[in-house]
Image (cartoon, grey):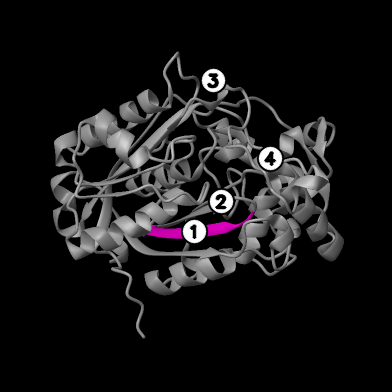
Amino acid sequence: MSDPFPRGRTAIVSTATHGIKGADGADAMELLSVAALTALKRAGLRPSDVDGLFCGLPLDFLSGLTVSEYLGVSPRMTNNNRTGGSSFMTHVMSAAFALDAGFCDVALVAYGSAQRSEAGKLQTPPKLDPIEGGYKLRYPIGSYALAAARHMHEFGTTREQFAEVAVAARGWANLNPQAFAQGPLEIADVLEARMVCDPLTVRDCCLVTDGAAALVMTRADRARDHTSAPVFVLGAGEATTHARISQMPDLTVSGAVQSGARAYAAAGVGPGDIDVVQLYDAFTFNTILFLEDLGFCGKGEGGPFIAGGRIAPGGSLPVNTNGGGLSCVHPGMYGLFGLAEAVDQLAGRCEEVRQIKDAEVALAHGNGGTLSSQATVILGTDATL
């Protein structure tokens, strides 16, 4: 069967982020609404134009309803699929199908969280796990530390290589005036930081911030009514392998192998065609794992692959050019911020010092749960159609 994905038939016509440096007293819904209204305004649209709503607030499992009410919209379809940080990549994929089928005409994907202001720590619903609960594994870092340790055991990956991921992310954040964490960061700083869950120190872990993001999608045939630089959805794919880390089939191989392959096939491109990469770096280990599983290097080669600044500013493979979840923003779920950065890079809207010249194809990858859900979106300029 040929791939059914509507390659290039839908486009992202605007993006917006808000509140990354602080919520200033706003709650998650208020942050989301500012980002959503800004993205709509940039596209020359009003809330009443939205007939497809895709969202997910941190602790609101009926967010499709509450966001609709708050924005004053009455969408023909809503989707608040919750797969963790990969949710928003799945939203873009679903929106592409819905737009192409005519189920909706204007799709809004939005998220907001005041995690840092309201809690100062990861906000997750209580987990009463009868299988893993007795082991008191810290959630979610314990799961990622377990996978990182296994990768080190099997392939010789080192803590210094994890640290290089954090240093590269900070290098990009230092070029991004919106980034929450800026300033010097050296490998020694990461290695000598407080150990949270061996082998991951606090500098191997993502930030806890506030923030909101939104993007607006339409069909390609009307995209230029809303922007001079539409970014087209070329392909997408997702994969779910488990929920609990104890049930992950292989701690060193994620579902990104499947989601990436599906996205590449739909887009008609491969890893060598990607100009800029946005990965879900909740932990430094993630970046190495996903570079392997998405085909940028071989399995077990991720540590040496990123050495020498390959993914840092000036390197041959720009990764997480906004600073990622490690240094730019991570308000509970990061995925939509990576998508927004990928779009802005292709549209040429980033600051000159971090704008990737002549970028035509971008990959944005989301991760949810404890390496449980993986979703990949590939975007392109009109040169790729």
Going from N to C along the chain, the mark reached first, 1 or 3, is 3
Nearest the eye: 350 or 4:
4
- Depth check, mark 1 against mark 3: the one in front is 3
Going from N to C along the chain, the mark reached first, 2 or 4, is 4
Provide the residue span drawn in magenta: 371-381
Contact (Cβ within 8 Å) of mark 2 with mark 3: no
- Residue 168 in the image: state x and y as whole percent: 65, 42
- Residue 127 vs 234, above or below: the answer is above
- The answer to whether residue 296 shows anywhere in this view is no
- Identify the mark at residue 368; answer none if there is no mark: 2
| Crowd class of label 3 (few under 14; some 14 to 19; many from 20; radius 10 Å) | some
Going from N to C along the chain, the mark reached first, 2 or 1, is 2
Report helix, strand or loop for mark 4: helix
Q: Residue furthest bottom?
A: 1
Residue type for callout 4: Ala
Q: CA distance from mark 2 to mark 4?
A: 20 Å
Contact (Cβ within 8 Å) of mark 1 with mark 4: no
Q: Which residue is mark 1?
A: 375
Image quarter for residue 150?
A: bottom right
- Residue 4 in the image: state x and y as whole percent: 32, 75
Going from N to C along the chain, the mark reached first, 2 or 3, is 3
Q: Which residue is mark 3?
A: 118
Instruction: Provide the major secondary structure of the magenta segment.
Output: strand
* Residue positioned 75% across, 56% down in the render: 303
Q: Which residue is mark 4?
A: 166
Report helix, strand or loop for mark 3: helix
Image quarter for residue 97?
A: bottom left
Contact (Cβ within 8 Å) of mark 2 with mark 1: yes
* Residue positioned 41% across, 60% down in the render: 378
Q: Quadrant of the C terminus?
A: bottom left
